[in-house]
Amino acid sequence: MSEQGSEQADTTSAQRAAEEVGAFLDEEFASRDVPRPAWGVFLGGRLLAGENADGIYRIASMTKSFTAAAVLGLRAGLIPSRDGAPALDLDAPLPRYILALRAPEADPGLARVTVRDALTMASGLPTDDPWADRQEALSRADFDALLARPASSGFAPGAGFAYSNYSYALLGRLVEELTGRGYREVVAEHVIAPAGLADTGFSTAEVDAGRIVPGYRFDASGAPVELPFSAPGAFSAIGGLFSTVKDIGAWMHGFGTALREHAGHDGWDRVRRDMQQAQRLVDVEGLAAVAGEERQLAVDSYGYGLHHRFDARFGQLNYHSGGYPGFGSHMRWHPASGAGIVVFANRTYGPATLLARQGLDRFLEAVLPARAGAGRPGPGRGDVRPVSALEPSAKARALPARVEALVLDWDDALADELFEDNVDLDQPRAERRAAWEAVLAATGERAADEGGAAQGASEGEPEAVWETAARASWRTAGPTGEREVSITLTPFDTLQQITVRAVPGR
């Protein structure tokens, strides 16, 4: 994740907010019978607060982000294919790359599923968590036999969303077919090692055994029962990894920084950018409380091995959950601010997702700039402005002060320099200038019958909030009212839209 978080959030307040989130998590875990939870709150890649951050846990379906990275790495030529392997086309059907799907006995329904369908959970295969979570150790021969069994389909491939572990098992097999190597070997060498994840691996033999945290289920009497770890196998691609809070924090940080305007331009940054984009609509959440959790307006989509969430309060979030016998896990980050959270629970399908979501919401509400004039926030909630992942250029950052000067003291020459040609076409200059004068009169920054520069405006440069790299707004208080200025820029950092309005009730 980006260093912009340290620019937007005061370090002391961020540290305090992280510790408050930690206190919330500790209290929640204590009430939910999680034997040994782990969590970490991050900002700009730095662990601000955490518990058992070096403990090694199963991360279950969070593994899918590693699988998707391997597939896209193959597509980009970042992972070498075997000699004679066909070039990977995301829109080609899976049988082009998986030999067993071309066998006469193979399930004909899978012949229509493309690589992209599988990556984005659009294969039509049904949600299959409890079953698939028990298939990790499946042998290659048994997987071949599975491919011959006709699978049910909820919709035609590409026509919807259904979370499918089977789809990602097929992608693991695709990696093996294209490389001529084992899936786990490829991911370890080309995805895990370059990311510097020293405590991440597919088996207990690949990580520090002394730090492995056991997983539990609770029997009918409420007593914890330790569960054995499944061995690696044909379904490792769906959820086989072990990792730590610290390693996953580093994994998230790599995704966040890849979205920065000045990120590196190697192929892996492009892979990470692609993975975080919305590819397949999952759900639109309203304002109603769901299962006791207050929810805000948001649109949830699936990308490549990651969820993309647009939240009306925070803007873009990315995340993935994991659930396995003995474990629940969740990673979640806010690329624009550099904030993120990792939560592990060592009980079957533990409450990591709910708590991570609530924890990061609390942290963002505390550290992001508040929306000016939003009114009184509800308990535990702050109305905060969405912030994009991309930073405005230096030229763009200089514009609010220049626009403010134009608002207060009109200058045709300055307007000519700032405006693109559509601005005067959208609203004639004389009309725009008169509208601005009316706003200045309403805020008391200029007497209604006076000309010249405005009087009584706030001192200093405006404190602009950048919602994206090309959109900003700020508020200025006059003697009798407040006004808001909003600007939208072209790709060339010139003005294509500018709005000046009086804020009602001020």
Image: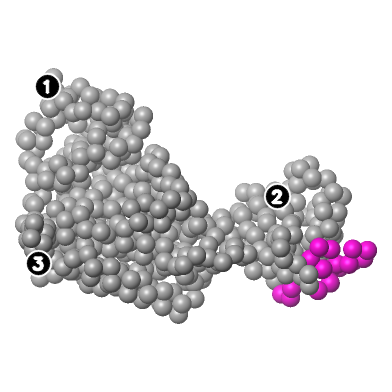
Q: Which residue is mark 3?
A: 209
Q: Residue at x 79, y 66 (%)?
A: 443
x then y, percent, for residue 365: 47, 66
Res. 428 mark: none
Q: Which residue is mark 2?
A: 497
Q: Is residue 67 left or right of residue 271?
A: left
Name the main secondary structure of what is drawn in magenta: loop
Give how far apart the Cα atoms at labels 3 and 1 are: 42 Å
The answer, for residue 145, to whether it is visible in the render is yes
Query: CB under 8 Å between callouts 3 and 1?
Result: no
128 part of magenta stretch? no
Q: Residue at x 14, y 66 (%)?
A: 213
- View extreme (bottom): residue: 12
54 w.r.t. 319: above or below: below
What's drawn in magenta, residue-wise? 441-460
Residue kind at label 1, given as amino acid type: Glu
x then y, percent, for residue 324: 17, 52
